[in-house]
Image (cartoon, rainbow, N blue to C red):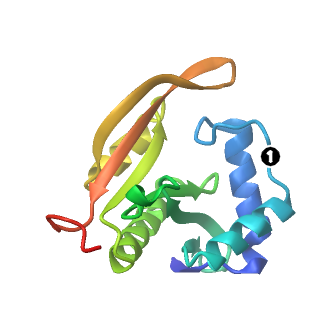
Amino acid sequence: MQLRQALPEDLPALLEIHNHAVRNLTAAWTDQQDTLEDRRRWLEERERDGLPVFVALDGQMQVLGYGSFGTFRARPGYRHTAEHTIYVAEGAQGKGVGSALLKRLIERARRDGFHVLVGAVDGENKGSLAFHQKHGFETSACLPQVGTKFGRWLDLYFVTLVLDDRASPSD
């Protein structure tokens, strides 16, 4: 498996992976599927802001999944915290794709000087909660019934990983 920064030619695969999650999973709390132009804008915004979008590729250079992080919240007090997201293609789960992407995101977040990495996980997704715990994340909060999809209420779990041992911010 190879990891690299996403390129414009990866957009159709990113779109399919994202829209599969929208149609079938509670990982993306929306019913609105993206268009190719939506994904293009998203990638361009990430690049403009200096934020990573990594793709995992198999030996035939097919996209197996992608991961990124961005701002946790827009206010300056959150500037040392990033929120990550990882999506793995159908059929590629359980093969180390998510772990490889998460490890790369953690490395990059540390390099970029972030102090905490946050994940927002649907409470029904026990696999994702266990996955994050395996990688050192702690479950920090549960917000019950704050979302809805597929005609039911969804709980939101925040998982967090402290990336360094700074006692206080340097700025």
* Count of numbered badges drawn on the protein: 1
Q: For the point 39% across and 78% down, which residue is it?
A: 112
Q: Which of 167 and 159 is in front in this view?
A: 167
Question: Visible in this render: residue 135?
Answer: no
Secondary element under disc 1, as helix, strand or loop, is: loop
Q: Residue sitting at 75 percent across and 49 percent down?
A: 19
Compared to 8, does 39 lie above or below? above
Estimate the x, y position of residue 126 in percent, counting from the top left.
41, 35
**Residue under pointer 1:** 33
Quarter where residue 38 is shown:
bottom right
Disc 1: CA contacts within 10 A as few (<14), some (14-19) or many (>=20):
some
Tell me: 23 left or right of 156: right
Q: In which quarter of the image is the C terminus?
A: bottom left
The structure residue drawn at horizontal position 52% and vertical position 53%, both measured from the top left corner, is: 93
Q: Is residue 109 left or right of residue 148?
A: left
Residue nearer the viewer, 69 or 2: 69
78 relative to 39 in the view: left or right: left
Give the answer, above or below, for where 106 lies relative to 118.
Answer: below
Closer to the camera in the image, 90 or 12: 12
Q: Can residue 77 be seen in this view?
A: yes
Instruction: Residue 14 in the image: state x and y as whole percent.
Output: 71, 63
Q: Position of residue 41 (x, y in %)?
A: 77, 67
Q: What residue type is labelled 1?
A: Gln
Res. 24 image quadrant? top right
Residue, x 76% and y 79% (percent of image)? 8
Give residue 80's position: percent from left, percent from top.
36, 64
Q: In this view, does 69 lie to the left or right of 65?
A: left
Residue reaching furthest to the top: 152
